[in-house]
Amino acid sequence: MAPRRSVAGIILIALGALFLLGQYLRVGGEAVVALIGAAFLVAYALTRQYGFLVPGGIMTGLGIGIIYEDRVSAGGAPVLLGLAAGFILIYAVSALRGRMPGDWWPLIPGGILAAIGLMLASDATGALAVVERWWPLVLVLIGLYIVLRRPARPAS
């Protein structure tokens, strides 16, 4: 069987199995994003293609946040924290698979989303106002760090 056809078949099998599980657990439409993300993660596990890991991590984390938000109505914090967890999952899996050091990028959106989600969860409106005003400064500081840091010495 051609690799593309087998990956497509595996994704359909995973989606079907996950939708059946969703029916059994009485989870409705709020789980669709998580189910699709889980199918991408299954495809990544079977093929080790990074292109499946990124949407898998993001959609699974976001979907879990949506499911939790639907259950508790927590003002959006679970959605942001779930999305942050999805980005951090991408980094963690990359680190475990030895794809480092270039795959640190998910920590940036993951960290920002986690910080905002935690502030929403703690109802820290004063801190949120500070973040809303000064987040561009954080981008400037990160950019300066990247530009001004010394390049790593090649192994000799």
Image: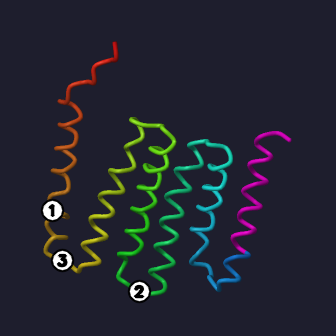
> Which type of secondary structure does the marked residue at label 2 adopt?
loop
Q: Earlier in the sequence, mark 3 or mark 2?
A: 2
Q: Which residue is mark 3?
A: 125
Instruction: Residue 148: give x, y in percent of width and height.
Output: 17, 30
Q: Mark 3: few, some, or many residues within 10 Å (few <14, many ≥20)?
A: few
Residue 21 left/right relative to 63? right
Residue 25 left/right relative to 138? right
Foreground disc of the pair 1, 2: 2
The residue positioned 46% from the left and 73% from the top of the image is: 65
Q: Earlier in the sequence, mark 1 or mark 2?
A: 2
Q: Quadrant of residue 39?
A: bottom right
Three-letter code, disc 3: Thr
> Which type of secondary structure does the marked residue at label 1 adopt?
helix
- Of the 4 image quadrants, the one containing the C terminus is top left
Instruction: Residue 124: give x, y in percent of width and height.
Output: 19, 77
Secondary structure mostly seen in magenta is helix
Query: Where is 97 relative to 130, above or below?
Result: above
Q: How is the image coloured?
A: rainbow
> Which type of secondary structure does the marked residue at label 3 adopt?
helix
The residue stretch that appears in magenta: 1-19
